[in-house]
């Protein structure tokens, strides 16, 4: 009888322990969701503040920032032409003047375009803080060594993003709009070229955001190399294919067939790939050193 009571007592004790552990896990999961909720709330507030600030000044933003690359007096056109003269390569970097008139074909077009500009602009302006909130959420799950390795990540991720956004706005957008505005299809008078407002807004938003994210390639390479998905040998193996793709993209979007204008677009992208190779090589060496010490 005593043995039965002891067994029953032991079973009840184990059951209470298991229930306590499950309660702790459930509470930890709820706390995790609560933390995520507040990170999202603060991120949305930061984005909303930037959104409202841009929307209040939407006319100035559109005239002086958004629509500027579609005008012939955009700073990039004169700067590239002057650079070509200083390098004694003549008019190689001088692009034909371009003025792209826009049309609106819907009643809500201007308002929806203003919302689109404000939303994307809010993401760009608030990007460092948005990434900081993401980092604060992920940080507790990292080990002490991973936290140490990731010091300065917010700064470098923001630098890469803004460098890519600037590259897209000041270089890629003028080349793209110049090429598309001077591209003709069919005979003279077959059609009248007049893009819509929302089409132009979507194009420049995609260029700026796309380049901003593309310039995160070194950061992405570092993360993927750390978790073992890619390596230096992998990037080295596919280097020639990546270079060919980059050169083809540069040749397509640059209106001039000479090598100088193509180099202005392709060199930064090639440099990003080269930096990614250097980063993965360093990560591979560090991993090999750690494995050697462990063994």
Image: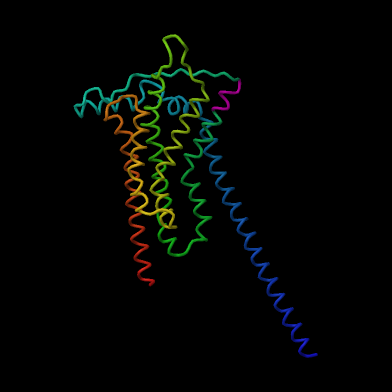
* Residue sitting at x 43%, y 29%: 65
Q: Judge by depth and name the residue closer to the eye, 244 or 77.
A: 244
* Magenta stretch holds residue 77: no
In this rendering, the answer to whether 122 lies above or below 190 is: below
> For the image shown, how many numbered marks are present on the structure?
0
| Residue 260 quadrant | top left
Quick one: which residue is furthest to the left in this view?
88
Pinpoint residue 195: horizontal percent, then vertical percent.
49, 20
In the image, farthest residue toward the top: 189
Q: Quadrant of residue 83?
A: top left
Would residue 4 be found to the left or right of residue 64 on screen? Answer: right
Q: Position of residue 119 (x, y in %)?
A: 54, 35
| Residue lying furthest right | 1
Residue 72: x and y in percent read 36, 20
User: Does 42 sit left or right of 16 as displayed?
Assistant: left
Q: Which residues are magenta?
A: 107-113
Residue at (59, 52) in percent of width and height: 38
Q: Is residue 3 depicted above or below 236 in this figure?
A: below
The quadrant of the image that shows the N terminus is: bottom right
x 32%, y 41%: residue: 270
Nearest to the observer: residue 90 or residue 169: 90
Quadrant into which the C terminus falls: bottom left
The percent coordinates of residue 95 (x first, y second) are: 32, 22
Q: Residue at x 47, y 26 (%)?
A: 62
144 shown above or below 198: below
In this picture the colour scheme is rainbow
Q: Main secondary structure of the magenta part?
A: helix
Left or right: 63 as drawn, with respect to 39 = left
**Up-down relation of residue 17 to residue 139 (above or below):** below
């Amino acid at each position: 009888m005593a043995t039965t009571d002891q067994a029953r007592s032991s079973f009840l004790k184990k059951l209470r322990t298991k229930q306590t552990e499950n309660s702790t896990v459930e509470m930890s999961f709820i706390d995790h969701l609560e933390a995520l909720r507040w990170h999202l709330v603060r991120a949305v507030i930061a984005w909303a503040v930037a959104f409202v600030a841009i929307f209040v000044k939407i006319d100035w933003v559109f005239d002086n920032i958004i629509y500027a690359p579609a005008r012939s007096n955009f700073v990039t056109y004169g700067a590239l032409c002057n650079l070509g003269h200083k390098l004694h390569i003549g008019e190689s970097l001088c692009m034909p003047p371009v003025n792209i008139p826009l049309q609106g074909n819907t009643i809500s077009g201007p308002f929806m375009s203003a919302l689109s500009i404000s939303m994307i602009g809010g993401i760009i302006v608030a990007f460092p803080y948005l990434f900081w909130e993401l980092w604060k959420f992920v940080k507790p799950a990292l080990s002490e060594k991973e936290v140490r390795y990731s010091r300065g990540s917010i700064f470098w991720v923001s630098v890469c993003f803004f460098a890519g956004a600037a590259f897209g706005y000041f270089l890629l957008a003028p080349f793209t709009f110049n090429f598309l505005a001077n591209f003709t299809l069919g005979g003279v008078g077959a059609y009248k070229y007049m893009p819509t407002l929302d089409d132009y807004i979507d194009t420049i938003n995609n260029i700026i955001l796309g380049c901003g994210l593309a310039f995160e390639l070194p950061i992405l390479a570092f993360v993927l190399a750390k978790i073992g998905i890619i390596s230096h040998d992998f990037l080295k193996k596919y280097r020639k294919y990546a270079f060919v793709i980059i050169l083809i993209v540069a040749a397509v979007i640059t209106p001039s067939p000479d090598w100088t204008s193509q180099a202005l677009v392709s060199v930064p992208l090639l440099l990003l790939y080269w930096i990614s190779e250097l980063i993965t090589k360093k990560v591979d060496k560090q991993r090999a050193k750690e494995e050697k010490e462990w063994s």
